[in-house]
Image: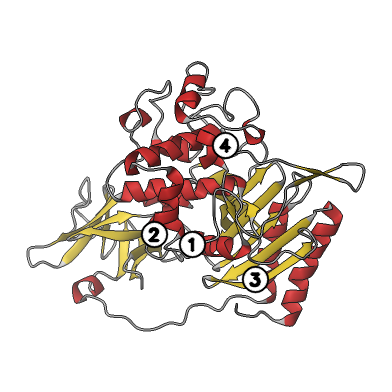
Amino acid sequence: MAAMLDSTELALYRLLAREQSVSRAPSLVAAVVRGGEVVWSGARGRVGDRRPDDDTQYRLGSITKTMIATAVMRLRDEGKLDLTDPLERHLPGTAFGSVTIAQLLSHTSGLTSESPGQWWERSPGADWEALVASLEKGATKLRPGSKFHYSNVGYGVLGELVARHRERPWFDVVRDEILTPLGMNRTTPHPEGAHAEGFAVHPFADVLMPEKWPDAGAMAPAGQLWSTITDLGRWTSFLGGHTGDVLSPGTVDEMRTMNTVDDTEVWSTGFGLGLMVVRYQGRHLAGHTGSMPGFLAATLVDPRSGTGALCLANSTGGVGITQLCLDLLTTADDLEPALPDEWFPSTVDPDLLALTGLWHWGPSPYFLRVQGDGLISLNPAVGAGRASRFRPEGPDAWIGLDGYYAGETLTVGRDANGTANHLNLATFIFSRTPYDPAAPIPGGLDEDGWR
């Protein structure tokens, strides 16, 4: 583990110690990641008669959902499904087959938040057939796509979707396709080896009540897994872009992109595809929180700085686990700002290099630049405006990745000599000079030109 400055480590440890003491957590562990590895970790409290360490398992709760979402995105990237597909196409026989895969991932399907019957987090779970039967009536509470509505049921459904496509249990898929390639060998559906017992802490006295953790059955994909600081550190790094061969960085970036906001209050949190998106002090963070009886968990990462934080506690409630993550992350970056990546020159195709420079949308100047990651960007030369990055789609064709032109196509227009003389971006024409007569400006130009 790479070391941080002693002063930084003390500041981080103090945040951890204060939260464990004030919140009366039986034990609390946390870590900061940067550059794809854990750079600091700490622990307070006891597990049994000893201090927990980086290899002590805690239950992840809903962080499990992020791994299910990753398995679904792998299926999408392989062409086995499309995010706009209705569920019925892949998992027939439900009463809610019209909801889409994307709606399930982003908690906009309108499905009920909890499975009918007993409190599922504290009850032995039934199988898929029993879950579907319990959802035959009243499963959809809101119009699909209308708004954010967190649904544990939706991830039970997605777990079954993964199992059907891969023809084996969902955890086997997650283990073989995600955990093992990332070296996360201490992430399991049930506690193995050193692990924390889950407790409820009495609100008015310093006494504990042990919590139970029955197998959740078909609802397990919503919150079953257990993990450690070491493993969750690797997962936090994955969400920040250190994706290995599990997913492309572009797909993880897609998962981190806001789809819907939680508008129950002035919003600071929303969801992408399986990931929470948090807006905090000018940062856009991604990750997830988790809670099950006896346990709380959180992981958040800033993709821009590459710094992330994660926390695990064996308490049913009362621990400010998300704020602790935010405080650890921002403290690490404030006290030890990450160095920018070192710049190196790269090779650029001459034809692409010829496209760079000044272009004009009407009279407004824009700069087209080649980025080191194989993308191009088109940005206003002065001030704010419609800025987007683009990835290559084919000869003289590029697809917008973000901003106003996300999903739109930019095509390069050439004259009879093959020289690029205009860009066509979602019908807007950009020319080398303002309203260049040689470019196909819609509507034509005043015959007297500039005067």
Corner quadrant of residue 170:
top left
Q: Position of residue 432 (x, y in %)?
A: 26, 65
Q: Residue at x 80, y 54 (%)?
A: 26
Q: CA distance from mark 4 to mark 3?
A: 38 Å
Q: Position of residue 401 (x, y in %)?
A: 37, 55
Quadrant that contains the N terminus? bottom right
Q: Residue at x 17, y 61 (%)?
A: 395
Tally of numbered tags: 4
Task: Report if the CB atoms under discs 4 and 3 are less than 8 Å apart.
Answer: no
Q: Kindly report which numbered mark, 4 or 3, lies closer to the viewer in this rendering.
A: 4
- Hey, what amino acid is under mark 3? Asp
Question: Would you call the spot at circle 3 few (<14 residues within 10 Å), some (14-19), or many (20 or more)?
Answer: some
Q: Kindly report which numbered mark, 2 or 3, lies closer to the viewer in this rendering.
A: 2
User: What residue sits right under mark 3 in the picture?
Assistant: 333
Q: CA distance from mark 4 to mark 2?
A: 26 Å
Corner quadrant of residue 338:
bottom right
Task: Report if the CB atoms under discs 1 and 2 are less than 8 Å apart.
Answer: yes
Q: CA distance from mark 3 to mark 1?
A: 19 Å
Element type at mark 1: helix
Residue 349 vs residue 246: left or right? left
- Hey, what amino acid is under mark 4? Ala
User: What residue sits right under mark 4 in the picture?
Assistant: 216
User: What residue sits right under mark 1 in the picture?
Assistant: 238
Of callouts 1 and 2, the N-terminal one: 1
Q: Is residue 115 visible?
A: yes
Element type at mark 3: helix
